[in-house]
Amino acid sequence: MTFFFVGAGLAMLRLFINGMIGKIKGKRLGVKIAFFIGLLSVGLPFQNWFCTEVIFAMSKTFINPSVIVMVASVVLMTIVCGVIYEKVRVPYLEEIHVA
């Protein structure tokens, strides 16, 4: 169950980062480089910690099912949140264009 929530959190993070990447289009090169340095400075240590302290510390029998659940929840939550975002965004944009 924990890996489902980890996967759901990763899906939300993925959608957030994709949105932020869309917002930095057209910005100066220095802003883009600083953004990706920030992502790497946070993401790489977390990835290292997660692999060494969580995944490799688990019993071998639980690793495959846990990783499968995590990947499935990332895919599922990305699709679900993407659909919800589109349903919320379209009426909001229609209200802006009408006004």
Image: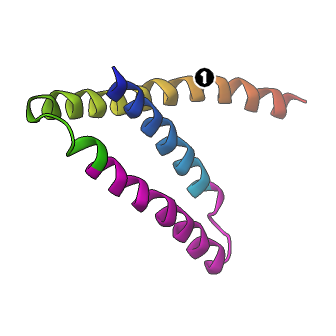
* Colour scheme employed for the rendering of this structure: rainbow
Q: Is residue 85 left or right of residue 62?
A: right
| Residue 21 position within the rendered picture, expressed as x and y whole percent measured from the top left | 56, 57
The residue shown at (20%, 46%) is 56
User: Which secondary structure lies at badge 1?
Assistant: helix
Query: Is residue 47 one of those drawn in magenta?
Result: yes
Q: Is residue 11 left or right of residue 56?
A: right
Image quarter in which the C terminus is found: top right
Kindly identify the amino acid type of the residue bearing the numbered disc 1. Lys
Image: magenta residue range = 23-52
Which one is in front, 7 or 20?
A: 7
- Residue at 51%, 27% (x, y): give it: 81
Examine the structure image and report whether residue 63 is included in the region drawn in magenta. Answer: no
Q: Is residue 43 above or below residue 96?
A: below
**Residue 91 in sight in this render:** yes
- The residue that appears at 37% across and 33% down in the rendered structure is 7
Q: Label 1 belongs to which residue?
A: 87
Foreground of the two, 58 or 2: 58
Residue 8, given in percent of the width and then of the height, sits at 43, 30
From the viewer's side, name the closer residue of 60 and 7: 60
Residue 76: tell me if it is visible: no
Label 1 Cα neighbours within 10 Å, binned few <14 / some 14-19 / many ≥20: few
Q: Residue at x 30, y 47 (%)?
A: 53
Q: Which x, y percent locates residue 11?
A: 44, 36
Magenta span: chief secondary structure: helix
**Which corner quadrant holds the N terminus?**
top left
Taking the view exactly as shown, the residue that stands out farthest to the right is: 99
